Structure formats: structure tokens, C-alpha cells
Amino acid sequence: MSDQEMNDEKFELGLSFHQQGNPDQAEMIYREVLNGNPNHKHAWSNLGAILSKKNKLEEAINCYRKALEIDQQFGECWFNLGNALRKGMNPVGAEAAFLQALKCNNSLFGAAVGLGQSLSEQGKFPQAAEVFKQIIAQKKDDPDLYSHLGNALRMQGLRDEAMQVYQMMLNLRPNDPKIIHQYGLVMMDVGRLEEAFNQFKYALSLKQDYPEAHNSMSIVLQMLKQDDNALAHNLEAVRLNPNFTEAWNNLGNLYGLGGKPKEAIDAFRKSIALQPRAIPFHSNLLLNLHYSPDMTGAEIYKEHAGWAEAHLKNFPPAQPFDNNKEGGRKLRLGIVSPDFRKHTVNAFMEPFLDSIDRNKFEVFAYSSVIRPDEKTEQFKLKVDHFKDVRPIPDMIASSMIRKDQIDVLLDLAGHTAGSRLPIFALKSAPIQMTQFGYPNTTGIPGFGYRVTDAFADPKGLTEANHSEELVRLPGLAWCYQPPADAPEVPKRSPKAGAIIFGSLNNMAKHNGKVLSLWAKLLSAVPGSKLRLLSGPGQESIKMVRHALQTAGVNPDRVEFLPRMEKKEYFAALGEIDIALDPFPYNGGITSCDTLWMGTPLLTLAGTTYVSRQGVAILSNVGMEEWIAKTPEEFIEKAKKSASEAARLSLLRGKLRDVVKKSSICDWKAYGSKWEEAVRKLWKSWCASK
């Protein structure tokens, strides 16, 4: 038997193992085949398929390219390459590969579907819809095709037409768990949550071991505020499929909201290991690092720089700008955000837009809102130009912004959900700034500027942990919009021996070290109680009670308040005697709300922006004595204040007026400070060109 024949026989053996579901053995044999014959195109292609299945995408892509170097007309290999590129989040490359596959063999059904999907992933929805319509004309009985077509139509805003297509999909197989699950995803996406819940429930009744349906059920339950059941479904999803990237990401979110930063970080790292090019999952990790009391500022910066290295290293170099370089002219301000809707960032965004001189700025909003609402419509009226860039790829959106001749581009999301940081990495405007939406660096080299202040980022303390140049505004880096519907400050006095400490921040900020310090405080102040806002489900309550019990404190001394409407929330803040600021992630708006309701706030100063928000707020309302430098001083200050009922009562009576007259409520002055800083940056850029 010749060497060639022996090698071919070995390949057939590897193929047999491959087809029998033994990829490890098959991989070993394919590699042996290639050692004997480096020009065996099928061995390269099959090895690529195994590596792709193992999420070793770079290696898989290299294998497919090796096969295609041997045979450019290898249609199935072009198809496999397209799938690997799609999986690796490279839809542009995938589109080209699928087109080549169809050029080699126009009967490759999967390549046609992949082409439509890659077009959708690039935001080319009209073209994608046409592709799917052409396939459906030849293959009317495949419900997946209707799902793809419906998505392409929905993303064009053709909701009624899309819903008709989805209904056709469901009619094809009304009892197919996969189709029912897909229909539920559509219902969830359009905000019909109860219908989505019922669809997922029905899918799971037909197929209990369906990890995707468990994950989707977890998400919709979170949206319906049924978090205990959400966690159970999420855990079942990763048990059924330990390589389910999206489920690990979702689990990280759940653990984070429940005040378990270590578990959250571990889950996010698992999702990234499974899908290294998934930018949103990696950004979720970065955001959650701020909740960990064990991470230093330098370590968190290193993680941000690692994000940029992982996702932006192949970006093209920035091109020169041809903007008008007149230093004093009216500037074009672009705001990029996924949150032109009901969202906490609106506490800054709306008054900010009202505070700047619109004779000096023409405002462009670049929106990535998933579910527009009435607030979206209000923002459309507040800006000069409102553009929906959600379905548009970053490269095209960047070109749009350059074409609009934007002078100053503002990021309001950072690494939060829906952010579009690659637009800034592409250097879309001469002046780029990040503020309001994210409490740290973006990690992007050459990003531009980050707006902050000298209290949260004192000079010499944090510059080394930023990829941006810090622009420190006088006073606070942001402003507080006092609530119009808050009740009056309650006329109450602390009761001796029954002081109520409290924090109505979200449970994600109440980590183990926070609870340990607060347990020591309860021990130091007999009869005192701790009042907290409960986190998602019962797990967070159990965690807090266990932490107190471990510290030797009766867990019944902690009271949990449910999620409340705004009016009840403000009233609850007013019933706390002394508010405690969590660390390392301090309160922000919650701290201002607390002071507005006459309740003093005690903070422990840290060394990062998030851990110095309490310092920044209190320093700007003249309450520096409520800032502790060490945990021991924190307890001593709390004990002393708890023993001074008359002082607390006096402070409660005047605190709202102090806040109202302070700089943190002066949006007009804030707008002027912001304009002055931006104009200085703009003139500097003009002078340098």
C-alpha cells in the first residue's frame, strides 16, 4: 500500500470517528493525515469544523483558509469559513465567504441562509429581507426562514409585516418547542412580556431539557421582577449546556444584581472564555469589576486596556478631519447613547440639554434605543437632529458622524448595555468625550477626554488608570435634578436606642465587606437597625442575613424594603436616621435623593471615581465632617452622630435647603462650566491643526 493510500485510509478512519461524535480522536487523526500530506483539503476543512465546534475560532479559520489555498472552488469550505466568521462576530468577512460559497455551488442552501444572516448582522436589513424572501419562494416549509425574514423586517420598522411573518412561522409548526421559543423571543423583544412568558412556558412543557428556553425564561422573569425563578432557570440552562455563552452572561448579571460580585465576575469570565470576541459580554465584566471590594483601580484599568486590545486591535487608523477650524463658531455636538428612553441616565441628560446654550451648540442625537417609548419622542423634540443608528454597523455610523461634521462627540454609555464604543475607537470626531453614563475609563487608546472633577479624581491619584485625558470641571462632574414629586421632609426625631441606619442603593453595591463593616456598626450602636432595599429575589436577603449572623449580629436587626414607586421610595429615605454609603461603588443619584429627604449620609473615602462619589457630593454641600477616611473612623463617626439626636433633627430640618442652594443643583452654572471646558478643548484642537 502506497503512502497516499495509507493516508487516505487514515483520513477515512478520522472521518468515521468524526461522524460517530468522537471529535478528539478525529482531530488527532486529521492532524496525522496533514503531517503526511499538507495538501489534503478535506482534512484541513474537517479539522476546522472540529476546532470551530470547540470555539477555537482563529485556529478553525486558519484551517479553512489552508484548504481554500489548495482549492479555491471548494464551496463547502467557503460555507464553513462563513459560519466560523459569523460565530467570531465578523459578518463582513462572513458575507464575502458565503457569496464565494454560492458562486462555487448555488445550491448550497445553508450558504444562502448564512448570507442573509450576515447581511442582517451588518444592518443591511432590506438586502437581508430580499435574500430570505428568495429562499422562502423555493422552500416554503422552513420556519427558521420566516424567523430570519421577520427579524429583518422588524429592524426596518415594518412591525406589522414582521408580525404576519412570525405568525406564519408559528402556524407551520405550532407544537415545535424551537418555533414556540422563537415566537416568545419576538414577543419579549416587542415588550409583550406575559405572552413571551407563556410561550417559553409552553416550549418547556414540550421539552424540559431545552437550555435556550430556560435562559429566555430567566430573562423574561427578570423583566417581570420574578427573580428567584429567574435564577433557577438560568442555573438549569448552564447545567444543560455548560458552553452556553449567553446563559453565563445572563447568570453574571443575576449574581451582580444580587450583591455577589465574585460569582458575577466568574460567570462573565466564563462567557468571555467561550466567546472571546463578544464585546457586550466583555463590557459586562468591566462594569461589574467596580462592585468588587478586592479590585484595585490599577487592576480595573488593566482589564479595560485588555478589552481594547482584544476588540479594537485591527481597527483602521484615524483619518484627518476637515471640520471648519474657527475657534469661536457654533459647534456641532453629537451625543451617542442607547438610553434616549426611560432610563436613569436621563436624570443627567435632560437637564444637561436644557443647560447648554443652544445658540452655541447644534445637537445631534445618535440613538441605539432598542425599545423606543414616550421619552424617546420627547428627546426627538429636545435635539436638532435625531438619528437611529441601532441597526447600523459601527463603521457606517462613524462615517455618518464624520459626514455630519460633528465637532464634539459625547459618549453617555461607556461599557453599559447597548454602548457603541467602537464608534469612538474609529475616531469619529475631533473632540471625543465620555461622561455621565459610566464611572471609569473606556480603556480605548486615544479616545480623547473623560469629564470628571477634582473630588472624585484628585490630581495625581487616578491619571495613570485612564486612557483618556481627564477634564476636571469645577465642583461636581455632574449635577442633580431635584425631584418635583418628592414629599416634604418628614418632621421626625431619631429615637434614642433605636437609630435607623440604611441604604436604598441597589443590592449589587452591598458586598460582603460592606455588610461586615455595617454589622460592626450595629454591634457598636445597641438597639440600632439597618434598613436596606431588597435585591432580586430571596437569595440576596439570605445573603445579608447570613453576613450579619456570621458577624454575631441578630439578623432580625436588618429590615428589607421591597421595590417601590418613586413616591414611596422618597418617603422611605426620609424615615432613615443616618444613611450609609456602600463601597467601593458609592451611591450617586441615590445619595442626592437621600440628602434631599433630610437624611445625612456617611461615606468612606476610597481611591477611585466610584469610591469617591460620596466625597464629591458631601464636599459640594459643605458636609465634609461626614466623610470617613478609615473603617474605624466610619464607625466612630456613625456612633457619635447616632448619639446626637438634637443635631440630627436640626440637620434634617435644613438639609434640603442646603442642597437646593448648593452647586450640585445649579444646572445653569454647570452648563456654563461645561461649555467653557469644551470651548477650550476645541480651540486647542483648532490651534494644533
Image: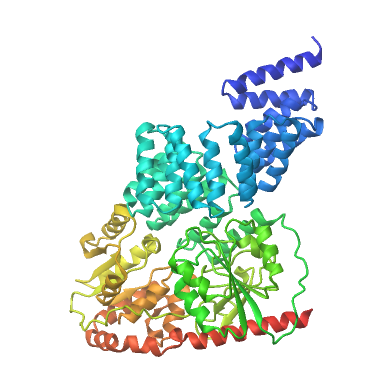
- Does 435 sit above or below residue 8? below
Q: Looking at the picture, how far across and down is residue 560, in whole percent?
A: 26, 63
Left/right of residue 657 with respect to residue 133 in the rendered view: left
Q: Is residue 344 left or right of residue 275?
A: left
665 w.r.t. 94: above or below: below
Q: Residue at x 56, y 23 (%)?
A: 21
Residue 161 in percent (x, y) is at 51, 48
Residue 478 visible in the picture: no
Q: Who is closer to the viewer here, 328 or 415? A: 328
Side of 123 where 180 appears, left or right? left
Quadrant in which the C terminus appears = bottom right
* Image side of residue 506 versus residue 243, left or right: left
- For image coordinates 65% across by 84% down, the residue present is 679
Residue 196 placed where, x, y %?
39, 46
Splitting the image into 4 quarters, where does residue 43 fall? top right
Query: In the image, residue 210 lies at what x, y percent?
Result: 42, 35
